[in-house]
Every structure is written in structure tokens, then in C-alpha cells.
Amino acid sequence: MFRVAMLCIVVAPSVISLLSGTYSSPEVKIKLSAIKSSFGIFGDNDKNPDSLCPIVDKVDPKDFIYESDTLDKILHDEGFRNASMEKLLESVRYPTQIYDDMINPNSAETLEELYKLEPRWKEMEKFHGYLKEAFPLVHKHLKLEKVNKFALVYTWEGSDSSKKPILLTAHYDVVPVQEETLDQWKYPPFTGGFDGKYLYGRGVSDCKDLLIGLMETIELLLTEGKFDPKRTIILGFGYDEEALGTGAFEISKHLISKYGPDSLFQIIDEGDSGITEYEGNKYILPATGEKGHLDSVIELYTPGGHSSIPPAHTSIGLLSKLISEIEDKEFESIISNSNPVLNQLQCVAEHSKTVDAELKKNILKAHLDINANSKLLDFLTKDLESKYLVTTSQAVDIIHGGVKSNALPEHVSVLINHRIAIEESVASTGQKVVDQIVDFAKRYDLGVVYDGDVLIEKTEKGYFNYSLVEPLEPAPVTPMGDEIWNVYGGSLRYLYEDLVFPDSKETYIFAPYISTGNTDTKSYWDLTRNIFRYAPGLETPHGNIHSINERLNFEGHPLIIAFYYYYLQIVDQLADPVN
């Protein structure tokens, strides 16, 4: 899995939106009336109506699923676990590597024509064949649509068309493995292996574990043959999340054409996994927002000439000066109530007994008091990881210039990558950079062109050309405190408190999180605001994704199956909230 800004302090709206009982189905009304306390819609929220971080009550699924013994089988039956492990390992053995230079599958009419242009796409089709073999009931009973040749959309049609579908997503492409690193892998990356704790292999944790876990869940429900969903269940699997994300883009277009905008109940995609501990408490942290993305590409064109008679600054020297000035002027840090980071910090401050008293006060007042907000920002910006949760980043990543030692460079360029903070935009990010370019150009008598518009006429000394490449606004933030939030969070509480750590007696706090990277959900914003980026599981070593010896704590894999086994049955009994 990134703005120039004036500090914006807003009075926090009510964090909790209580279930109002506005449901269309009498059957569901009766059911929900009996289970509101189990769902936790009223529990803690009534006890502390002023809470900035109410703890959602646990949802016990046993009243809503047809076979609770299956959960024990998923988590503890050796035969089931071994079969699950083999399915995941087998999926790794298909090297579905995605490269940045692979052409869009729509570049050819047929697969045969596409493979002539780009044979590396063949592995994707082979992986499709594996899924069909491994999950026969899914392919027999669900409708499979292949979108743009390789994106997979499985639909389990519900019996009640008035209910909005739920979309569960993952991707099966993986980042390439460099041949030079093969001898550093504990097990070959496209063979995989198990050392008694971790499964190894490229894609085993990003994110074939989620994809295979979802397929196993549906296959299990079909095998038992007792679940007849009312709410349509859709599985959407992209093929190039690690590159351009055209697969998810095409899936989104397909679903919008079929169901329309704002047509889905909920989307759950990959994201952080497992639980995190802060200040003595355990947290379940789905990403409810994502920073935006932008590449600033700055080119400088100057007259050429012989290197024996150089100007005071060559184009390389000029661009170097500009880069230094851009780096020296950082984006301002900002945190408002729209940022999930503040909501997360409020949870830590409200529920922890070990947080410094002054810091706690500043966190809990930051959405109302400008001085408290400023002090909180001072605290967050002391550490790079927390700094860039509240600050737009600027990373000089690629530079080109010059072709020969005795020729003055006539063209040089730099790419600066930005991850855009929640409170800002592509426009404000670009404006900060272009203002610096214009100021610099005036001092050195150079022209400026910005995304095709001439800001300063080109001069004899040259000109800058500034382009915004791959712009992506920060993601809309998922609503907190409504029934979807409460039921999803309460269901995850049950997973960890009752199934995984039943002896701990700890309360797990469900809180929002922000992703500094982007998942395939960037293509799904028009389908629903209820987007969560999270996968059930257990902690795996930090820095594991995209690296040598990519691995997965296997004890966490059955949690995906167990959770979705009961969660799909729970949400099937909910009517859609009335907006």
C-alpha cells in the first residue's frame, strides 16, 4: 500500500450515528430489534455520548450463522488447515508478475494477439485455470465475468434485489523478483515453502492470501449448501494493482454500468492486517482513507554549446539549484477532523492510561483549539513516519540530463513524487511547486510552461516545462459511527477476542487509520463511501511486503476464512441504511 495549507480547525460533528430503526423489511426489523445490543449499536455510545472514540460493542455471530461448529473446523482442524495451506502455496507457484511497461490488455482483440505483443500476460490466464481447478463449486454456482481479459468478477446473486451488493476485493498480480536476489530467498519465490510458522513466496502476503481466503470462504459456504444469500456478494480481483491498476478501473466501470453509482453496501480490500498495540491497548485499524498521489515532472530546456565555454550555470546546475530550493521548502503539516489520523489519536488518548497528560489534552482538543492543534503537529512532525501522515511529501526520485562530456546539456528533467495529505489536493500540491519554479525562473531569466499554459514567455536562455503526471486526489474518507462501521468493527472484535485470543480478556478498539499508499480502491470511490482497507490476520515482520523472503504467519490465514464465513451471513440479515 504523499500540501500547502492554511490550518483548518472545524468543530467535530457527532462521531456516532445511532441506528434509527429505518429498515424496509419487517422480517429484518424484528430480527434487528432483538439483536441491537449484540450488534453494539447502542451499548457504549449511550454510556458516554460525548466520547470521541466510542468502543463498538462486540457482535456475536452465533445467533446469525447456521453452523457455528464450522468456525472451530476452520481454525483447528488439521486436515482443513493443511488443505488451505496447499491451496495458498499452489497459488504462489504461478508467477503472475506485473511490470510497469506491460501494455493494456485492451491493446489486442484476442488473447492470441495479445500474447504475441506481450507474452508475459500468459501467466495470468494460467492462474485463472488454477482457480477453476481449486474452487470448482465457485465456478459452478457463481457467475464469472472476465473484464478486460484478466480482471475477475465473481457474482453470487442474492435473492433480494433491494439490498445493495457487498464487494470483496483483492489482486493476484505480484511485484517482480529480481533474478540477482534468487539465492537470498529461504525458499524459491515461485515455489514457496513453510518453516513451521511462516509461509514463504512472492505474493503470499500481498495479496494472494486474501484472494485465496475469500475463494475458500465461498467454496466452503457452497459445500455446506445451507447459505442462500439475500444480499448479492461480489468478488473483484484485479491483475495489475502493483502497476497502473487498470484491472480495478475496468472492474469499476463494469460494476457502475451494471448497478450504478453509490450502489454498493460496502467494499473491503487489502490493507493492514491483524492488530496493533498502542499505549497498552490493542487496536484493529482499517484504513478509512488514502493519501493522494502526484508526480511533478520538471524539464529545463537551454541552449547547447561546447563545454569549454560554459555559462555560469548549465541546465544541470540550474535544475540542481531549483531542486534544492523545493526540498528546502517543505509542505506545511496539517491535521483536521477530516483526517483519520486525528480520529485514531483520539482513540489512543481517550482509552489509554499511559499517554502523557499534556499530549492527551492536546489530542482531545485539537479539533477545537488552534493552540492544541499546533502542539499536536509539533509532536507528530518529530518522527518521519508520523510526520507524513499529516504532511504532503516530496521525494526527488528520478533525474536525467546530459549526453556527452564536451557538450552542454540542452535538456534535463527531474521527477518528484508527492503523496498528498488528506486536507489538500492535486491543485494545491502543484501550485506550491509551480510558484517556486516561477520565482526561480524570474531570477534566472527563464520561461515557464505549466501543463501546456505559458506562464512566462520563453527566453533566449531557455524555459521550464512543468507537468502533473498520474494525479490522484486523496480518497474520500469512510464514514465512522454508522451501522456498517459498528457491525464491521464489532464482528472483528469477536474474531480476535473470542476466537483468536479468548484468554486475554482484553477489549480490542476499532479505530480508523490512513494509508500512505494506494490500493485498487482508488478506482471504486463512485460505488460507495463505505470502503475499508483491512485483512484479518496476525502480525508478520515489518518490511516484508515486496521484499526478499516475502512471508506470511500462517496462523493468520484461517482468520480470513473464519471471519468472512460469519460476516457474510451477518450482513446478509441487515437492511441497507437509509441515507
Image (cartoon, rainbow, N blue to C red):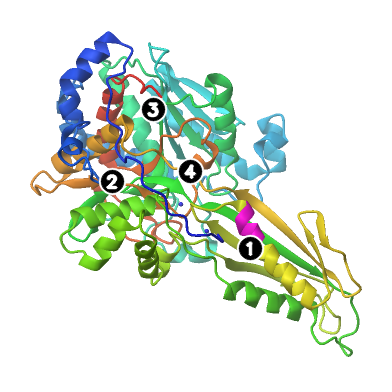
Q: Looking at the image, is 140 positioned above or below residue 298?
A: above
Which residue is identified by label 1? 432
Residue 200 visible: no
Which residue is identified by label 4? 94
Nearest to the observer: residue 453 or residue 48: 48
State the residue lying farthest toward the bottom.
308
Nearest to the observer: residue 20 or residue 498: 20
Nearest to the observer: residue 457 or residue 89: 457
Which residue is identified by label 3? 135
State the separation of the CA atoms marked 3 and 1. 52 Å
Nearest to the observer: residue 154 or residue 347: 347
Magenta highlight on residue 152: no
Mark 2 or mark 3, which has the lower sequence index? 3
Which circle, 1 or 2, is nearer the viewer? 1
Res 139 → quadrant: top left
Report the amino acid beneath label 4: Tyr
Which residue is identified by label 2? 537
Q: Which residues are magenta?
A: 427-431
Residue 11 visible: yes
State the separation of the CA atoms marked 1 and 2. 41 Å
State the separation of the CA atoms marked 2 and 3. 22 Å
The C terminus, quarter of image:
top left
10 Å crowding of disc 3: few (<14), some (14-19), many (20+): some
Mark 1 or mark 4, which has the lower sequence index? 4
